[in-house]
Amino acid sequence: MSVAAGSQEAFARLYDAVAGPIYGIAYQVLQDPARAEEVAQEVMLEVWQTAPRYRPESGHAMTWMMTIAHHRAVDSVRTAQRSAERERVVSQREPTPAFDDVVEAVEALGERERVRSCLKELTVELRQPVLLAYYRGLTHTEIASALSLPPGTVKSRLRRALTRLRHCLGALW
């Protein structure tokens, strides 16, 4: 075989004769034209590089090349399956929060800290109605009962507390 001797001319003739059937066997296994083309190119490169090792007594050259093509195509399928499996395992193991979710969580944490800080600046008589209304969800009447205060006093304390919080928080409100 003159391809084994490194003849580019002989290889060009061989390529023209076998590239189609090699692509065909690769496509039959892969069912993907682009991947079949890649495999066919890899096979032809391997034939060029390993031609000196081919032994005619082992079988027909076409059988040898088609066997290489089939093995390469099967390897390509296995590689793709392993890659897909790795991606599936990693995606199940490490859910990555969306960038916007992380940003929102960090911003919310910062805002909560500012609110806590501003609440600490209020007097106890102004802080209590705010905590009962906004953290426990009590109505004005329920706050008045809990603090033994008239409902009007609860409303005015809440109004004063919210005005001070608004001033303390500045840009948040």
Image: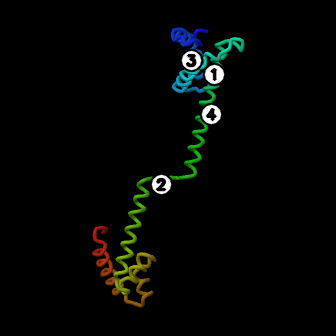
Instruction: Give the residue at x 34% y 87%.
Output: 153
Q: Secondary structure at mark 2?
A: loop
User: Of the residues under marks 1 and 2, which one precedes in the sequence?
Assistant: 1
Q: Residues within 10 Å of mark 3 (few under 14, many from 20)?
A: some
Mark carried by residue 48: 3
Rendering colour mode: rainbow
The residue under label 4 is: 78
Between marks 2 and 4 in the image, the one whose residue lies nearer the viewer: 4
The answer to whether residue 168 is above or below residue 71 is below
> In the image shown, does 41 or 91 lie closer to the viewer?
41
Report x, y in % for residue 27. Answer: 58, 23
Mark 1–mark 2 distance (CA, rounded to whole Å): 45 Å
Mark 4–mark 3 distance (CA, rounded to whole Å): 25 Å
User: Of the residues under marks 4 and 3, which one precedes in the sequence?
Assistant: 3
Q: Secondary structure at mark 3?
A: helix
User: Of the residues under marks 2 and 3, which one precedes in the sequence?
Assistant: 3
Mark carried by residue 68: 1
Q: Secondary structure at mark 1?
A: helix
Mark 2–mark 3 distance (CA, rounded to whole Å): 49 Å
Give the amino acid type for the residue marked by disc 1 in the picture.
Answer: Ile
Mark 2–mark 4 distance (CA, rounded to whole Å): 31 Å
Give the amino acid type for the residue marked by disc 4 in the picture.
Answer: Arg
Q: Secondary structure at mark 4?
A: helix
Mark carried by residue 57: none
The residue under label 2 is: 97
- Do the CB atoms of the residues marked 4 and 3 lie less than 8 Å apart? no
